[in-house]
Image: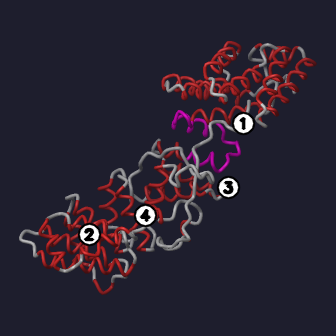
Amino acid sequence: MVSPSVPPRNPYHEFMLSQPDKGRKVLSTISQGRSFLESGRHDEARRALLQALSLCPHAIPALNNLAYIALREGDNARALNIIDEVLQIDPDEPIAHALATHCWFELESDPMVRFHCEAALSGYIQLARLGDPVEADYPDRAFLFVFQALLIAEDDAGIVKLYEATPDRDWSPVELTWAGIAHYNRGRINEAHLIWRRAVRTGKFGPARTYAKLAQHVLSNEVLPFTLDYDIMMGEDEDLSPFPSSSLALASLVNHVFTKRTRLAQEALAYLLQNDLPSQEYFLVRLAQNPRVTAGVRILAALHLLWIGYNVEIGERILRNVDEDQLGPSDKPVYYLLRAAYLYYEEGADMHLVSQYADQAYHAAMRQGMHWVTEYLDELMDSEERVQTAMRDLDVSAGLDEWEEESPPFSLIPLVGDEADDATEPNSPAQKDRKGRKPPKGRGHNS
């Protein structure tokens, strides 16, 4: 129980070191309270913890657990009052500051969240360095609370500092994924990549694998880094969206753009550009000139560059160099779309020829089941009433409305996970939605 080699730092430590018999009774009662708390028996836990305080009024673990009960019951005011008692005993107590971070987050006071989050990290680093004279595993308990406080505050720098301060800790794949996100958001892309690869080796954690691939694309200058959030998929939950994390969804879509399966890559790119990828022009320019991606993806990137009025020469160069006969079935719909778009934007455009290429795009897409192409056709057809007239002359638009109603949603794109590279084609019903949840707020742990 007691480690005389570790000096006491507060009245609680002094009591436990000076009265070992009573100290053992205090720890036994606190342990009983923790057990009740873990099983959700709050009233029994509260009685045990109050009994421990009757033996030692400075029993910090008992007070912390009472504050935790109040927090779980939604009574932030009571929790903060108890936390104040703890901080009067030990102003550096990391679990108390971590719990205060939770309370102030619920009360939407960002300055107080930042203050207590920084104090929790500072107190933990001191605790990890010096150890605890009463409970040897207390630093491990504190780590869980402090890490969750840093996640709540989205403190990238703090998480990096915590990671660097615990080189010998056995981090779980989920914790490593969060640590990688913090490094990435601080611009330390190579370190983030290495941490995510470590997470994959440790537990083959799907989100870590997704982010590791994203980091590879960033390191290859194929996409600029964008801020990642800390929400990651962690299991099944019918009440939550299959895309609980916007950055994880974007990362997954970016990765799928680089797959060799043209249909999947094109659909991923089309959906990605609907979701406002940061630094979109940079991404499209690099993509349109990237020999590692399929011809259909390069053509679709060039089409978007044309529509946003950026560097039309890239698309012209693609059209000059592409041999239509060498294109695969999934490449031809976007090839015809690009042809139609370039003709349309030419001065004195031949609208009949524009309509012919649009007609070819429609039928080629319909044969491949590439339903999302209709949205691009609508974009082109709705640009000018005369285009609509020309399209009706070819009886193309007559079938579009009916086809659009039957078009599947983009959710058929495979989601993140270990199976992403081996996923079936995007039109396959074998692609099953996966659910997730946000990082737990200390649930399942007690102090």
Q: Which residue is mark 1?
A: 445
Q: Which residue is mark 4?
A: 409
Find out whether the residues at labels 2 and 1 contact each other: C-beta distance under 8 Å: no
The residue drawn where x is 66% and y is 30% is: 72
Q: Is residue 6 left or right of residue 384?
A: right
Q: Is residue 295 left or right of residue 184?
A: left
Which badge, 2 or 3, is on the more N-terminal residue? Answer: 3
The quadrant in which residue 148 appears is top right
Q: Is residue 354 left or right of residue 281?
A: left
Q: Nearer the viewer, residue 59 or 138?
A: 59
Return the x and y of residue 210 as percentages of the image width and height: 53, 58
Quarter of the C terminus within the rendering: top right
Find out whether the residues at labels 3 and 4 contact each other: C-beta distance under 8 Å: no
Q: Which mark is residue 202?
A: 3
Return the x and y of residue 207 as percentages of the image width and height: 56, 55
Residue 176 magenta-highlighted: yes
Q: Which residues are magenta?
A: 151-180
Instruction: Name the front one of labels 3 and 1.
Output: 1
Q: Which residue is mark 2?
A: 377
Return the x and y of residue 135 as percentages of the image width and height: 81, 28
Q: CA distance from mark 1 to mark 4?
A: 40 Å
Label 1 packing within 10 angstroms: few (<14), some (14-19), many (20+): some
